[in-house]
Image (cartoon, grey):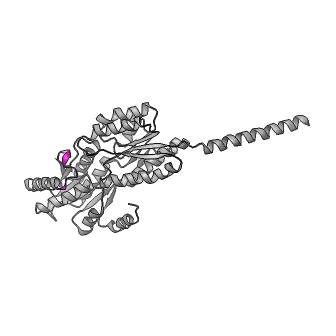
């Protein structure tokens, strides 16, 4: 009988010890200091990505962690500048890092340094699951750039536009090259043909430079009836350049991302469509994944988490506008 009671007491003690250890583990949350490398904070698209990252960061902050945004001053030297930001994140003691693989030849050595240092990494926005696999990242979050461009080219091609030009204001950036390649292939899938109007990186975000270049290109190539732009500001400038060339209603535009003016363009009929890659979700999901991984060891089995492409046109623009008003788009 005494032996029975001793065994019972031992089991109770063991249970209490296990419960105590579990309680300690559940409260011993590691504060995750997450660094996010992205675009310029005043870039309309990247400001949305930044908002998503910071909203997810509120959970990290509640647990004693933080989210730090690192973006370049401009896009003139994109790959090397972004690589330097990645190395800054390492030097500043990041517990986890999020970054886009814009220019692999310049940025991959820095990403490999992240992984070699044992810092969890998520690739987002550019590079796809291929970059995540190559670099040893946990996940890829974002659209597939080629498929985004393809969706725009296919849309315009099916609408009857057969000669297109992709306006590339960030030459050398892998995701932008993929947009244009996809656009051209999308047009070709419907029997059309595509080309690239390549401008220097200093033209990105310079509405006057882009509009003038588009105007000149259309006057020199009067058979072009479709254009694709790589971002919101460039899309508005492309619409302006078409008008300056006297081609409104003859040359139709699709572009990446959207803002209020682009949604208005679609409503007014001066723009055919916008390709949405849901930047807010990119920032939000990437930070959430890393915060949960650092704190709890939680992983997401779906390593390629796609946020696009989705096409916004006259058929759904009103619903998208309501989403924008609600802060969800």
**Would you identify the image quadrant in which residue 211 lies?**
bottom left
Instruction: Report the number of numbered marks.
Output: 0
Quadrant including the N terminus? top right
**Would you identify the image quadrant in which residue 255 lies?**
bottom left
Q: Looking at the picture, how far across and down is residue 303, in whole percent?
A: 45, 43
Q: Residue furthest right?
A: 1
Q: Residue furthest top?
A: 116
Q: Is residue 327 magenta?
A: no
Q: Looking at the picture, how far across and down is residue 74, in whole percent?
A: 26, 46
Residue at 52% in and 43% down: 31
Q: Looking at the picture, how far across and down is residue 57, in whole percent?
A: 46, 50
| Residue nearest the observer in this picture, 63 or 38 | 63
Quadrant including the C terminus? bottom left
Q: Residue furthest left?
A: 220
174 sits left or right of 250 in the view: right
| Residue nearest the observer in this picture, 145 or 153 | 145
Q: Is residue 307 visible?
A: no
Q: Is residue 286 above or below residue 219?
A: above
The region drawn magenta spans 201-207
Q: Is residue 205 magenta?
A: yes
**Would you identify the image quadrant in which residue 233 lies?**
bottom left
64 sits left or right of 282 in the view: right
Q: Looking at the picture, how far across and down is residue 110, in whole percent?
A: 35, 34
235 sits left or right of 325 in the view: left
| Residue nearest the observer in this picture, 191 or 140 | 140
Q: Is residue 32 visible?
A: yes
Q: Is residue 226 above or below residue 129?
A: below
């Amino acid at each position: 009988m005494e032996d029975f009671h001793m065994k019972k007491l031992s089991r109770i003690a063991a249970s209490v010890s296990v419960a105590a250890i579990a309680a300690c583990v559940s409260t011993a949350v590691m504060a995750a200091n997450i660094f996010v490398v992205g675009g310029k904070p005043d870039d309309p698209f990247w400001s949305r990505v930044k908002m998503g990252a910071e909203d997810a960061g509120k959970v990290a902050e509640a647990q004693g962690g933080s989210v730090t945004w690192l973006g370049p001053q401009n896009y003139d030297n994109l790959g090397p500048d972004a690589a330097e930001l990645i190395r800054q994140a390492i030097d500043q003691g990041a517990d986890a890092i999020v970054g886009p693989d814009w220019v692999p030849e310049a940025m991959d050595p820095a990403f490999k340094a992240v992984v070699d240092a044992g810092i969890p990494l998520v690739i987002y926005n550019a590079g796809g699951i291929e970059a995540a696999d190559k670099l040893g990242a946990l996940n890829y979050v974002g659209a597939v750039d080629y498929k985004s461009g393809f969706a725009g080219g296919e849309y315009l091609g099916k609408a009857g536009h057969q000669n297109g030009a992709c306006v590339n204001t960030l030459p050398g950036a892998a995701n932008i090259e993929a947009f244009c390649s996809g656009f051209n292939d999308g047009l070709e899938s419907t029997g059309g043909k595509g080309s690239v109007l390549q401008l220097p990186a200093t033209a990105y975000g310079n509405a006057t430079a882009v509009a003038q270049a588009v105007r000149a290109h259309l006057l020199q190539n009067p058979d072009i009836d479709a254009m694709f732009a790589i971002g919101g500001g460039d899309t508005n400038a492309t619409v302006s350049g078409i008008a300056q060339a006297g081609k409104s209603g003859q040359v139709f535009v699709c572009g990446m991302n959207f803002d209020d003016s682009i949604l208005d363009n679609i409503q007014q009929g001066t723009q055919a469509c916008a390709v949405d890659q849901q930047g807010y979700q990119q920032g939000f999901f990437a930070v959430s994944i890393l915060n949960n991984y650092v704190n709890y060891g939680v992983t997401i089995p779906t390593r390629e988490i796609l946020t696009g492409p989705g096409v916004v046109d006259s058929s759904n623009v009103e619903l998208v506008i309501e989403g924008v008003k609600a802060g969800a788009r």
